[in-house]
Image (cartoon, rainbow, N blue to C red):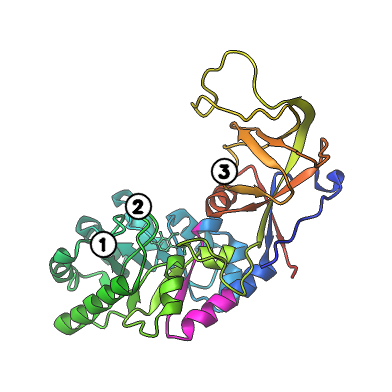
């Protein structure tokens, strides 16, 4: 997909807004419709994952308006925010609850992903006391080595959970390519399918959700005719950034540029490319090294690692990010005549997206534009 170079805008227009994230709702609406159509064509329901945008109400409503009925987030506070704002969806906590947040989970999550009996028991007690039922998806460890119970413990868990008052076991799930980088390939999906079929048979459970993974499942999905029992995926990055996540390849037909980050130049000077004086640790605790390029135009942006995950930013103009500290990012402006007050545009990866959307110092600007 063509990357649009954001034009430099007159500084005065942006004076009160920077740093800012420009969020193109039209492009995300296009992406969510395309992702939904793709996966639903083989019977897979898409849960929209909002954690990358800090449970943004605007984005949550956009997903719901474009046919997503389930929203997942890893933070109960984001689920609460969306629920209290009146977003009309089923809310799912995307990670196993902490014991200390069980009550909030029962209040704000319709479903939670779980992998600890002690937590499930607390959820049960709390749900009973509130006269409600907590639906749970039991996470199975299939190799990525983050959350999930080992397969040899499935029976013990199911037997302990299935008759618990206040708990309804609505599915099993697995997660991939988040921690260990393990691919959700045909073999892993087949294992999950067989486990689901076996649990359904032996325990007479309907187990409506067999939740096979996330944006990393695109390659498996598009290369297999046989999706087995997998009928549910939890998708964030593909909707927001238009990519699968095994290699970060753009998904054909999706927008990869729905988010653009802008920061403003606060100093622009010709200076040496290499620091001079005796070198010790910098703000990040490293002994930095720089390439000798002679004198260069060094531009400082008024953002640093307390505002954004700077390593996840890619300038849309031909500039280099030389380094950063907590409140400053230093650019080599190369041949771009950047002056104080100029905005500089960047595309973002998932880490930068997440950091910017949770940042209180970055303005969020929602636009409709294709
Ligand atoms: C358990 C779980 N499922 C799904 C997702 C969504 O992943 P992605 O954004 O790669 O689609 C995440 C991460 O955000 C997750 O932790």
Q: Which residue is mark 1?
A: 141
- On the question of residue 16 being in view, the answer is no
Few, some or many residues within 10 Å of mark 2 (<14, 14–19, 20+)? few
Left or right? Give the position of 276 relative to 245.
right
Residue 36, image x, y percentages: 52, 78
What mark, if any, has residue 311 been given in the picture? 3
Q: Does 46 lie within the magenta span?
A: yes
Residue 345, image x, y percentages: 72, 49
Disc 1 Cβ-to-ligand 1 distance below 8 Å: no
Residue 34 vertical position relative to residue 337 in the rendered view, above or below: below
Residue 306, image x, y percentages: 57, 37
Few, some or many residues within 10 Å of mark 1 (<14, 14–19, 20+)? some
Q: Give the quadrant of residue 240.
A: bottom right
Q: Nearer the viewer, mark 2 or mark 1?
A: 1
Quarter of the image with the N terminus is: bottom right
Q: CA distance from mark 3 to mark 1?
A: 31 Å
What mark, if any, has residue 132 been given in the picture? none
Q: Give the quadrant of residue 194.
A: bottom left
Residue 370, image x, y percentages: 74, 70
Residue 300 vertical position relative to residue 44 in the rendered view, above or below: above
Residues at discs 2 and 1 in contact (Cβ within 8 Å): no
Q: In front here: 131 or 98?
A: 98
Residues at discs 2 and 3 in contact (Cβ within 8 Å): no
**Location of ligand 1 given as a quarter of the image:** bottom left
Q: Which residue is mark 2?
A: 101
Name the residue: 65% across, 17% down.
276
Closer to the chain start, of discs 2 and 1, is 2
């Amino acid at each position: 997909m063509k990357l649009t170079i954001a034009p430099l805008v007159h500084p005065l227009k942006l004076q009160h807004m920077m740093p800012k994230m420009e969020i193109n709702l039209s492009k995300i609406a296009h992406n969510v419709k395309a992702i939904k159509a793709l996966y639903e064509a083989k019977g897979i329901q898409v849960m929209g994952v909002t954690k990358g945008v800090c449970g943004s109400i605007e984005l949550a409503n956009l997903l719901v308006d474009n046919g997503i009925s389930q929203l997942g987030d890893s933070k109960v506070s984001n689920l609460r925010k969306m629920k209290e704002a009146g977003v009309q969806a089923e809310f799912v906590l995307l990670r196993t609850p902490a014991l200390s947040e069980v009550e909030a989970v029962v209040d704000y999550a319709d479903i939670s992903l779980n992998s600890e009996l002690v937590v499930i028991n607390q959820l049960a007690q709390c749900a009973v006391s509130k006269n409600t039922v907590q639906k749970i998806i039991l996470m199975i460890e299939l190799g990525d080595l983050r959350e999930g119970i080992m397969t040899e413990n499935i029976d013990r868990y199911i037997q302990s959970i299935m008759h618990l008052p206040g708990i309804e076991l609505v599915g099993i799930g697995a997660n991939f390519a988040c921690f260990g980088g393990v691919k959700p390939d045909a073999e892993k999906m087949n294992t999950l399918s067989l486990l689901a079929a076996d649990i359904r048979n032996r325990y007479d459970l309907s187990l409506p959700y067999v939740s096979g993974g996330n944006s990393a499942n695109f390659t498996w999905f598009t290369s297999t005719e046989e999706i087995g029992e997998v009928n549910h995926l939890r998708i964030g990055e593909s909707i927001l950034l238009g990519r699968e996540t095994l290699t970060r390849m753009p998904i054909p037909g999706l927008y990869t540029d729905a988010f653009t980050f802008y920061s403003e130049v606060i100093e622009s000077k010709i200076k040496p490319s290499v620091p001079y004086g005796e070198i010790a640790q910098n703000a990040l605790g490293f002994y930095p090294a720089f390439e000798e390029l002679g004198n260069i135009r060094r531009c400082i942006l008024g953002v640093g690692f307390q505002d954004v995950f700077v390593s996840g930013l890619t300038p849309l103009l031909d500039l280099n990010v030389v380094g950063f500290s907590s409140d400053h990012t230093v650019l080599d402006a190369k041949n771009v005549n950047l002056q104080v007050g100029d905005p500089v545009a960047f595309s973002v990866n998932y880490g930068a997206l997440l950091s910017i959307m949770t940042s209180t110092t970055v303005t969020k600007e929602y636009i409709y534009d294709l």
